[in-house]
Image (cartoon, grey):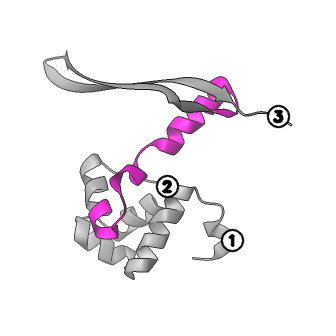
Amino acid sequence: MCSALKNKLPTLCQTLFEAKAAKRLTFADIGKKIDKDEVWVAAVFYGQAKPEESDLKKLSVVLDVKENYLVYGYPLKAIINEKFGDGIMSAIDFTAKVEKIEKDDHERVKITFDGKFLPFKKW
C-alpha cells in the first residue's frame, strides 16, 4: 500500500495493515483463515465493512493483534466530538457498567460508559 494512502487511514486500519505485513499474509490468506471473502477482508482493513464480534476474535488471532484494538473506539470518539466538541472522555473520572436486560423475550447486553468530557485546550 502506498504511504500517502496509509497516512490518511485511521490508526486502527494502519494497525491492521502493519499486522498483515508482519505476518506476510494476503487478503485471501486472511479470508481463508476466518472463512470470509478476500474482498470483505480488504473492506474491513479500509474501514468499509463492519465485522461481527466472532470475526473480530478470529482476526485478532490470525493477525496477533489484541482484540480490544479492533472495536468501536473511532466511531464513538467521532460521535462524542459531534455532540460535545473537540475533546475526550476522561478515563480518570470514569465508570463502566455491564447489565443483562430482557427485551422482547431475548437476553440483551447493555453497556454504559460514564466519563467526564474534557475539551481540548485552545492555545
Q: Is residue 46 visible?
A: no
Q: Which residues are magenta?
A: 60-87
Residue lying farthest left?
Answer: 105
The answer to whether 11 is drawn above or below residue 86 in the figure is below
The residue positioned 48% from the left and 69% from the top of the image is 17
84, 39: nearer the viewer? 84
31, 114: nearer the viewer? 114
Quarter location, residue 1: bottom right
Q: Are marks 2 and 3 in contact (CB under 8 Å)?
A: no
| Residue 28, position as x, y percentages in the image | 33, 76
Residue of label 2:
47
Tag 1: Cα neighbours inside 10 Å, few (<14), some, or many (≥20)?
A: few
Residue of label 1:
4
Quarter location, residue 81: top right
Quarter location, residue 22: bottom left
| Disc 2 residue type (three-letter) | Gly
| Disc 1 residue type (three-letter) | Ala
Q: Is-magenta flag for residue 66?
A: yes
Tag in front: 2 or 3: 3
| Residue 38, position as x, y percentages in the image | 35, 70
Residue of label 3:
122
